Amino acid sequence: MIWLDISKLEDKISKNKLSDKDGFNYVLAFFILSALTIDSGLQYENMWLKYLNCFLLVLITIWGLNKAYKANDEIDGKDFFKRFFAINWVIGMRMLFAILILSFILGIVIGIISLASSGKYIDTKPIKDLIITIFVSLFEVIYYVLVINSIRRLKPITE
């Protein structure tokens, strides 16, 4: 993987020497950095939960992308990036709508519990942070499972 020398990368691409595996490594690195960036935007009072969330996001990203890549290899090993990003877009849009709806519902539930308990149970920051960590990790796992299953369903079509 070339980290800083753009001329070397351009030369490799121009000579058609950038393999799908090389491309996968760039995608994996991009998604790992994206997971770290997403985590850095979340506000945590408890730093251990912040580190746990960061660790889980990176771990799930590595697991999910590797499984998606292997699922594509099981089909025919071709067009991973075209397939992945097209499927990623549609599933990402569906997940966005689901997250918006569930966040709204979760916000109402947390508000009701907070009012009913005078804020005693939910207003403690570590509980809120833990709920966010579980929520984000669960949705990322669901996202990758949907992507992987969608790639696997392509098999009968390409044979």
Image (spheres, rainbow, N blue to C red):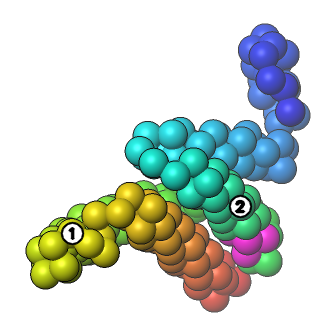
Q: Which residues are magenta?
A: 67-71
Query: What percent of the width, then of the height, locates residue 78?
Result: 74, 61
**Which residue is rendered at x = 52% and y = 47% of the image?**
39
Q: Amino acid at mark 1?
A: Gly
| Identity of the residue furthest to the bottom in this view | 156
Q: Toward which corner of the image does residue 67 lie, by quadrant?
A: bottom right
User: Of the numbered discs in the image, which one, if any, rests on residue 19?
Assistant: none
Q: Image check: 12 left or right of 30?
A: right
Identify the mark nearer the N-term, 1 or 2. Answer: 2
**Which residue is rendered at x = 83% and y = 36% of the image?**
18
Query: What percent of the width, then of the height, locates residue 111?
Result: 15, 71
Q: Give the residue number, with chain letter if any, for mark 2.
A: 59
| Quadrant for the C terminus in the image | bottom right
Which residue occupies the foreground of this view, 96 or 36? Answer: 36
| Residue 159 vertical placement versus 91 (above, below) | below
In the rendered structure, are the residues bearing label 1 and label 2 in contact, judged by CB atoms less than 8 Å apart? no
Q: Amino acid at mark 2?
A: Leu
Q: Toward which corner of the image does residue 19 lie, by quadrant?
A: top right
Q: Give the residue number, with chain letter if any, for mark 1.
A: 119
Q: Secondary structure at mark 2?
A: helix
| Quadrant for the N terminus in the image | top right
Query: What percent of the width, then of the height, locates residue 135?
Result: 43, 70
| Residue 2 vertical placement versus 99 (above, below) | above
